[in-house]
Amino acid sequence: MSYAGDLTPQEAWAKLEDGAILVDVRTEGEWAHIGMPNTAATENDPLFIQWTFPGGIPNPEFIDQLKLQAPEEDGTELVFLCRSGQRSIAAAIAATRAGFTSYNVLEGFEGEPDRYGERTVNGWKNRGLPTNLGKN
């Protein structure tokens, strides 16, 4: 593994309560139509930086955008979140290479699909962690 590790949604929330910063790497459409994590109960607002654009086109500015938004303090941990925990792995790897301490949220925001294709099995939202509809 080339990043700090994988966290369950509950473990990710505990990291956020301890001062880590959540980085949501989904697309603008996902934020607007599916919802977003709400970290108001922690000391840090989440960062919203697309890892890919619609159609899976990579965001060539991802690391530059991360460096502009993430604090420069040594030791600040970043927790990466996507829909199901796959894009966030790639983002965590890239961020680690750029010098950040990075974790991936297993299950992602929506989790895996059930037998009907609905994302109701697990993930941040389905585990009951704080969520907003639409980007603020």
Image: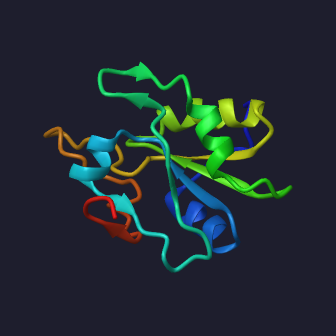
101 sits to left or right of 132:
right
Residue drawn 56% across the image and 32% down it: 62
Residue 112 is situated, as x and y percent measured from the top left of the image, at 33, 42
Residue drawn 64% across the image and 33% down it: 63
Colour setting: rainbow
Residue 120: tell me if it is visible: no
Camera-side residue: 120 or 110? Answer: 110
Residue drawn 64% across the image and 34% down it: 64
Which quarter of the figure is the N terminus placed in?
A: top right
Q: Is residue 19 above or below residue 34?
A: below
Residue 57: tell me if it is visible: yes
Furthest toward the front, the residue is 68
Furthest toward the left, the residue is 116
Residue drawn 67% across the image and 52% down it: 70
Q: How many marks do you count on the picture? A: 0
Residue 25 is situated, as x and y percent measured from the top left of the image, at 47, 42
| Residue 91, quarter of the rendered image | top right
Which quarter of the figure is the C terminus placed in?
A: bottom left
101 sits to left or right of 36:
right
Residue 46 is situated, as x and y percent measured from the top left of the image, at 52, 60
